[in-house]
Amino acid sequence: MGDAVAAIDCGTNSIRLLITENGRELAREMHIVRLGAGVDRTGRLDPAAIERTRIALAEYTGLIARHGADRVRMVATSATRDAANAEDFHAMVLATLGRPAEVISGDEEAALSFRGAVDGLPEGGERLVIDIGGGSTEFVRGAREVRAAISMDIGSVRMTERHLPSDPPTAAEAAAAVADIDAAIDRALAAVGAEPATLVGVAGTVTTVAGIALGLESYRPELTHHAVVPLAAVEEITDRLTSLDHAGRAAIGAIHPGRVDVIPAGALILRQIMRRTGSTELVVSEHDILDGIASSLA
């Protein structure tokens, strides 16, 4: 058996691949496939979304073979937990990747996110890790190990589809989204604890907002990793993103084209988490559930 391992994270908005060997990163890829498009409304995965995912997964399968990674773990999260026709997705994965995808619970998703996020951060201190995805947001509290975790059904795709049909969103739409988000955050904090902790954010919404805060013209993970973003910057960016239309947001270089339509909702979730937790700043980690999956294999 070789030393290379491959981790695949298939979420509501994106599918990502990480290949490592003895802790060294060999490949890290991401495609926006929007697997969870419409799931909140229909309860089913769109066949076109499954096909987009298949094309990306076929590319990843080739990379895995090229790097000789024979320990492979593919994790599927929020969208495939919710869908009535999830068996269509799983048949596609088995045919394309040659092994099944694991549909993990929100709690396990949270634990893997925490494991990836805290890797490389200084020892000690209570942390609250937030993983804002397309369909759900995980809240995980602990120091080096998870003490409490919960997954809530608020995510950038889900909130956009549920509350923000206009472009840009109207004030009433944004207010409805915030009410939904705040209720979920309050339930999450009741479950994991509301005492002060260092807030650590992972995943695409967080790294995108960080890139905008840093004035980056393109995605630069080496600059956003472990960046500290103040609440004031998140407030200003959220106001900006929710006031711009699609073309205005697309002109911001730090936003991946596949996130342009859902980043206002993602920013609202991030802003509200910072407000509800009383956090004046956010530590950004480029390491997340994908790194946690790879670590579980290594």
Image: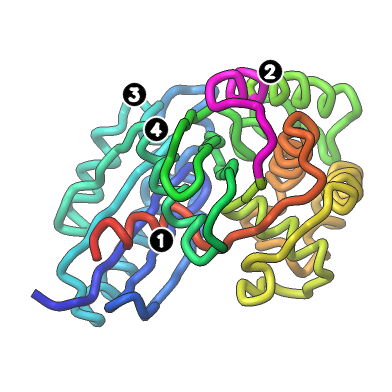
- Mark 2 sits on what residue? 183
User: What's the residue type where badge 2 is placed?
Assistant: Ala
Looking at marks 2 and 3 on the same chain, the residue that comes earlier in the sequence is marked by 3
Q: Which label sits on residue 291?
A: 1
| In the depicted structure, whether residue 283 falls above or below residue 157 | below
Q: Report the magenta stretch's main SS.
A: helix
Asked if the residue at tag 2 contacts the one at tag 1, i.e. Cβ–Cβ closer than 8 Å, the answer is no
- Mark 3 sits on what residue? 84
- Mark 4 sits on what residue? 107
Residue at the image position 29 percent from the left and 38 percent from the top: 103
Residue at the image position 22 percent from the left and 58 percent from the top: 96
Near-viewer residue (246 or 18): 18
- Which of the 4 image quadrants contains residue 239? top right
Looking at marks 1 and 2 on the same chain, the residue that comes earlier in the sequence is marked by 2
Q: Secondary structure at mark 2?
A: helix
Is residue 245 among the parts visible in the rendering?
no
C-alpha gap between disc 1 and disc 2? 30 Å
Residue furthest front in the image: 124
Pinpoint residue 279: horizontal percent, then vertical percent: 77, 41
Q: Nearer the viewer, mark 2 or mark 3?
A: 2
C-alpha gap between disc 1 and disc 4? 16 Å
Pinpoint residue 224: horizontal percent, then vertical percent: 67, 68
Residues shaded magenta: 185-197
- In the figure, is residue 105 to the left or right of 94? right
C-alpha gap between disc 4 and disc 2? 19 Å
Q: Nearer the viewer, mark 3 or mark 4?
A: 4
Looking at marks 3 and 4 on the same chain, the residue that comes earlier in the sequence is marked by 3
How crowded is the residue under tag 1: few (<14 C-alpha within 10 Å), some, or many (20+)?
many
C-alpha gap between disc 1 and disc 3? 29 Å
Asked if the residue at tag 4 contacts the one at tag 3, i.e. Cβ–Cβ closer than 8 Å, the answer is no
C-alpha gap between disc 3 and disc 4? 21 Å
User: What's the residue type where badge 3 is placed?
Assistant: Ala
